[in-house]
Amino acid sequence: GAGVSQTPSNKVTEKGKYVELRCDPISGHTALYWYRQSLGQGPEFLIYFQGTGAADDSGLPNDRFFAVRPEGSVSTLKIQRTERGDSAVYLCASSPDFTLAEYNEQFFGPGTRLTVL
Amino acid sequence: SQKIEQNSEALNIQEGKTATLTCNYTNYSPAYLQWYRQDPGRGPVFLLLIRENEKEKRKERLKVTFDTTLKQSLFHITASQPADSATYLCALGGKLQFGAGTQVVVTP
């Protein structure tokens, strides 16, 4: 069965540009998460979706970051006016149902490595 | 603020020995704690989840303990193998707050 997929695997952009990162979760998983991981650090929570709605976006660093999940499946993380400090690996994860602890195992994609020059 | 600490130094261990990793947390009362494995260039992979009312949990050669009084979890890899070499992350909460991870290197 297919796991979580993310595209592109690598993205190089210039400071000030706009980027979109895509996540395809495991089919049927209602919960979807975005994390950001810098070198030598653990993943840092950005935003969580339950279905189509953003249930918790408290981890988004500022208003340049935005994420959508219009049909409750694929999600796109959008970053406007990119800055060099945005360079990191962006990870997406999905799980069957956030509300049930035993199902809170999260399945991660391989990540998108974003480099802002 | 909530804080999760894992040993930042890599753990070098000989094949066949037991690796023990520590995860300490502060300002947090988690209902459960998770451990993940991460290989270079890949996303984390779930290993074990332990609830606050469970003292110990095992899965094959892995064992996790959870002491809510000490605010600490220990992660053990018994009979370690070179294939166990990776970074191991502990995580708390539903939306997962991760520690920085501890790299384990198992040498033949």
Image (tube, rainbow, N blue to C red):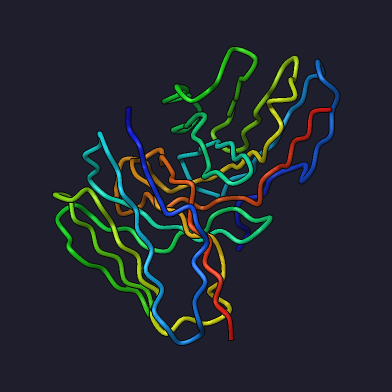
Instruction: Indicate left or right for B58 with A88 as reference.
Output: left
Q: Who's the residue at 30% across and 66% down the image?
A: B64
- x, y (%) of residue B52? 19, 52
Picture quarter containing residue A116?
top right
Q: Who's the residue at 49% across and 34% down the image?
A: A45
Q: Who's the residue at 46% across and 59% down the image?
A: B46
Q: Who's the residue at 43% across and 46% down the image?
A: B99
Instruction: Indicate left or right for B79 with A40 as reference.
Output: left
Q: Is residue A53 above or below residue A72?
A: above
- x, y (%) of residue A23? 65, 40
- Return the residue nearer the eye: B75 or A31: B75
Question: Quarter holding the C terminus of chain A?
Answer: top right
Q: Residue furthest top?
A: A63
Q: Is residue A6 above or below residue A78?
A: below
- x, y (%) of residue B65? 25, 63
Q: Is residue A17 above or below residue A23?
A: above
Question: Quarter holding the N terminus of chain A?
Answer: bottom right
